[in-house]
């Protein structure tokens, strides 16, 4: 065996060891990371929170707009470190609140239980907003609700199926007829 063959054999052994170790680490982790802050379990959790806020009716719900991925991206890319911490702790707090109220995690709760819990949290966040000082962060549920609404109504699903959408708008018409129950316009 010459030196080139020996170096190639050692490289193959070390490469195989590194690849094998990486494979084992990825197989043993409980949930793959979606980005630096969120894993797939958290994104699935946020999908369910979003679906509870905007459920599927005659139009697709928030889950169809992949709202969990949207929230994860927005929190990572647009929120400051303090708000990121509040949001991530909020996921745990929401799950703990559900467990305290119904003796089960949010993902195991029935749709009616989820709705009742989120309604309670919405009232709590409104009270928090009225009493908070300017420098204090927003309530975590307010962040979740705002991101759900923003993500859904700016998504393709929300803009084209929940709202009326014209891909190329025509002239401005300031007096459009509107009947009660009509969909709003997406811009």
Image: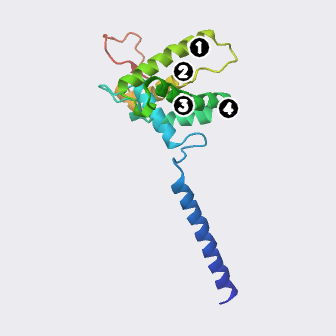
Q: Is residue 170 shown to the viewer in this render?
A: no
Q: Is residue 3 above or below residue 98?
A: below
Instruction: Give how far across and how far down residue 145 sits, in percent.
Output: 50, 23
Marks 4 and 3, how far apart in space?
16 Å
Q: 40 left or right of 133? A: left
Which residue, given by chain and number where applicable, does mark 1 sit on? 128
Q: Determine the secondary structure under disc 3.
A: helix
C-alpha span from label 4 to label 2? 17 Å
**Could you tell me residue 34's position as x and y percent?**
54, 44
Check disc 4 and report the residue beneath it: 81
Query: Counting residues from the N terminus, which is met first, the one under dot 4 or under dot 2?
Result: 4
Query: Neighbour class for label 1 at 10 Å: few (<14), some, many (≥20)?
Result: some
In front: label 2 or label 1? 1
Question: Between tags 4 and 1, which lies in front?
Answer: 1
- Which residue does the image show at 57% across and 43% down from the upper left? 35
Question: Which residue corresponds to mark 2?
Answer: 142
Residue 174, image x and y in percent?
41, 11
Mark 4 lies on a secondary structure that is helix
Q: Nearer the viewer, residue 183 or 52?
A: 52
Q: Is residue 153 left or right of residue 132?
A: left
Q: Name the residue under label 3.
A: 91
Chain-order first, disc 2 or disc 3: 3
Q: Gap between marks 2 and 3, in whole Å?
A: 12 Å
User: Tags 4 and 1 in contact by the CB under 8 Å rule?
Assistant: no
Left or right: 76 in relation to 98: right
Separation of marks 4 and 1 at Cα, in angstroms: 20 Å
Q: Is residue 26 visible?
A: yes
Dividing the picture into quadrants, the one containing residue 136 is: top right
């Amino acid at each position: 065996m010459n030196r080139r063959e020996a170096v190639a054999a050692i490289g193959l052994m070390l490469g195989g060891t590194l690849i094998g170790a990486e494979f084992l680490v990825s197989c043993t982790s409980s949930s793959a990371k979606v980005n630096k802050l969120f894993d797939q379990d958290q994104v699935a959790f946020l999908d369910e929170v979003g679906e509870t806020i905007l459920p599927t009716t005659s139009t697709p719900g928030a889950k169809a707009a992949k709202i969990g991925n949207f929230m994860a991206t927005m929190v990572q890319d647009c929120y400051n470190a303090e708000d990121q911490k509040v949001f991530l702790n909020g996921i745990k707090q929401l799950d703990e609140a559900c467990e305290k109220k119904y003796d089960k995690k949010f993902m195991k709760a029935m749709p009616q239980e989820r709705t009742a819990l989120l309604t309670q949290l919405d009232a709590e966040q409104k009270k928090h907003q009225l009493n908070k000082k300017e420098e204090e962060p927003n309530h975590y549920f307010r962040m979740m609700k705002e991101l759900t609404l923003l993500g859904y109504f700016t998504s393709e699903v929300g803009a084209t199926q929940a709202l009326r959408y014209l891909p190329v708008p025509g002239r401005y018409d300031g007096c459009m007829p509107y009947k009660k129950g009509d969909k709003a316009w997406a811009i």
